[in-house]
Image: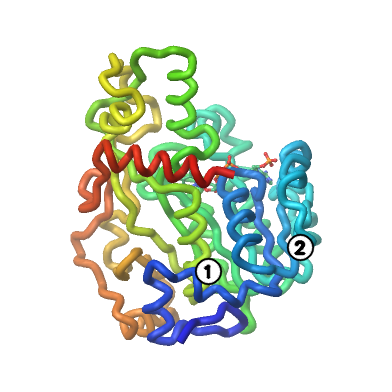
Amino acid sequence: MTQKIGDGAKPAGSALNSVSKENAIHSLKGLAGKSILVTGGTGSFGRGLVDYLVQHFTPDRLIVFSRDELKQFEMQQRWRQPCMRYFIGDVRDGERLEMAMRGVDYVIHAAAMKQVQTAEYNPFECVRTNIHGAENVVRAAIRSGVKRVIALSTDKAANPINLYGASKLASDKIFVAANALSGRDRARFAVVRYGNVLGSRGSVLEVFERLIEQGATGLPITDKRMTRFFLTVQEGVKVVLSSLAMMEGGELFVPKIPSVKMTDLLEAMLPGGAHQVIGIRPGEKLHEVMVSEDDARATLELPDRYVIAPLFDFWDRTHYIDCGAVPVADTFSYASNTNTRWLDIEGIKALIAKSKAAKV
Ligand SMILES: NC(=O)c1ccc[n+]([C@@H]2O[C@H](COP(=O)([O-])OP(=O)(O)OC[C@H]3O[C@@H](n4cnc5c(N)ncnc54)[C@H](OP(=O)(O)O)[C@@H]3O)[C@@H](O)[C@H]2O)c1
């Protein structure tokens, strides 16, 4: 049995099991004929999502919502399918969001200010986009009768130490709590949290590649002990869509993805280079966490992801348990340095090649 996304669709046992496996995406047939809006649709994730959706489904409308007309103009040259709509708008503008969400079934909220240093230096701007923007998306979705919303989050939101992470944590909380605001015929809201996306705009891969092109003989590393979670844009798109299919509302989904030692990433990109240690930057962690020990009590494990359940009294986790989800131990945490899955240098090279081959 395949679970079809749609009004009132509950993840029946076998459906949830199938959703959790590699071929989860095939259960998303229900996206055909639906209207989908992606905030931040011109970004690295948004472009990957649009490319995936137009290749695999025939949505009725696929709306890209973002501010900069040049990026939208460039996308229009590439994705001209009749379903495509390009809306200029700012998530800080609730009225515009509401107008854009009319008749929309599913919203993926990817718009964000995401550079740690920029957020530290421009805190009011970060709060307006990442926190007020989240509130506006929730209000507009409830008022417009949207059925499901997935918001993207980051590992930096778990035990945050910088404003970017703290603002995304606030955003996560807003989306989880939105399920209690939306009433009986409710819009449902969930969050997907993941780590560094290889090759996304402003990513470490882009920075290192630019240095190598400029003839660098070594690359900068802030601390040789540093580890990070890594995935490709395409993997991010798939986990977001499969989470959209299985969500009940209120979950924070965390995919199981590999860790990388930053020294191995340097070696993969510039073998034998004279790499320089430049010291850890303000707001930077040595290792990232996706499920903190404090979240463990609320966390269930599926084969391909963790589900942090909301702490609402009314939220029933039995359907997840019935489908084979297992509560993690109280002492559990999911961190980049204690991960059981690692990529070695060859594995990193393969992931980089995979991410480049699929770049859109
Ligand atoms: N990249 C990563 O490594 C990573 C890792 C974990 C989580 N995430 C999360 O994934 C999401 C997408 O990231 P990404 O890598 O695709 O980012 P990105 O490439 O920087 O794209 C950001 C998108 O948001 C739009 N945007 C920014 N501010 C906006 C606003 N106020 N109103 C409307 N649109 C706005 C941008 O377009 P305009 O500038 O034209 O508005 C752009 O389309 C973010 O929520 C991020 O926190 C990313």
Q: Secondary structure at mark 1?
A: helix
Q: Position of residue 172 (x, y in %)?
A: 49, 57
Among the 4 quarters of the image, the one containing residue 68: top right
Residue marked by disc 1: 244
Label 1 near label 2: C-beta < 8 Å? no
Q: Which quadrant of the structure image shows residue 182?
A: bottom right
Give residue 133's position: percent from left, percent from top: 64, 51
Amino acid type, callout 1: Leu
The disc, 2 or 1, on the residue closer to the chain's N-terminal end is: 2
Q: Residue at x 34, y 16 (%)?
A: 218
Residue under the point 65% across and 56% down = 38
| Ligand 1 placement by image quarter | top right
Judge whether 112 appears above or below 118 on screen: below
Between 161 and 341, the residue placed more toward the observer is 341
Label 2 vs label 1: CA separation?
A: 20 Å
* For residue 331, side relative to residue 221 (left or right): left
| Relative horizontal placement of residue 104, taking residue 48 as reference (left or right) | right
Left or right: 188 as drawn, with respect to 304: right
| Label 2 Cα crowd, 10 Å radius (few <14 / some 14-19 / many 20+) | some
Q: Is residue 231 left or right of residue 113?
A: left
Residue shown at 40% from the left, 39% from the top: 352
The three-letter code of the residue at mark 2 reads: Cys
Q: Quadrant of the N terminus?
A: bottom left
